[in-house]
Image: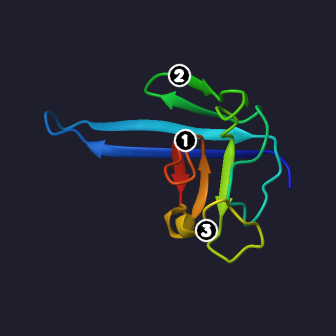
């Protein structure tokens, strides 16, 4: 219903040492999630970020014609009444929630 903060903390063993490389990143939006969308939705309040090992904020591009505006995406895999221009592409859509990128390849994706 309200704002969403997604946090991910991941680590991997560094082959050159005994240390684990840890990265913390995520996404924020104040927009409401919409089910069964076949396209992006939301507003420019949506952004991706990295907290560790360094701080980085990646703001979304504003909607300008056919570019930008790829804020957030949600497809639970259920059939929908929303029709796209090319129904044959239906199986190429990512199933889950995503931020940025394209419907087939979101920048941050959780399935």
The secondary element bearing badge 2 is classed as loop
Residue at mark 3: 87
Residue at left 54%, top 57%? 110
Which of these two is toward me, 76 or 66? 66
Distance in Å between CA atoms under marks 2 and 1: 21 Å
Residue 102: give x, y in percent of width and height: 55, 46
- Mark 3 or mark 2: whose residue is earlier in sequence: 2
Residue at left 60%, top 62%? 86
- Mark 2 or mark 1: whose residue is earlier in sequence: 2
The secondary element bearing badge 3 is classed as helix
Q: Quadrant of residue 79?
A: bottom right
- Mark 3 or mark 1: whose residue is earlier in sequence: 3
**Residue located farthest toward the left when viewing the structure as drawn:** 16
Question: Quick one: quadrant of the N terminus?
Answer: bottom right
Residue 64 left/right relative to 17: right
Which of these two is toward me, 41 or 82? 82
- Image marks 2 and 1: residues in contact by CB distance under 8 Å: no
Q: Is residue 94 above or below residue 62?
A: below
Residue at mark 2: 55
Residue at mark 1: 101
Q: Is residue 68 above or below residue 74?
A: above
Q: Single out the mark in the foreground, 3 or 2.
A: 3
């Amino acid at each position: 219903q309200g704002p969403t903060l997604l946090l991910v903390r991941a680590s991997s063993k560094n082959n050159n040492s005994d240390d684990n490389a840890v990265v913390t990143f995520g996404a924020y939006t104040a927009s409401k999630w919409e089910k069964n969308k076949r396209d992006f939705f939301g507003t420019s309040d949506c952004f991706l970020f990295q907290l560790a090992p360094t701080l980085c904020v990646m703001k979304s591009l504003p909607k300008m014609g056919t570019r930008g505006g790829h804020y957030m995406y949600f497809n639970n895999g259920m059939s929908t009444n929303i029709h796209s221009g090319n129904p044959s592409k239906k199986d190429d859509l990512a199933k889950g929630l995503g931020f940025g990128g394209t419907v087939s390849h979101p920048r941050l994706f959780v399935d």
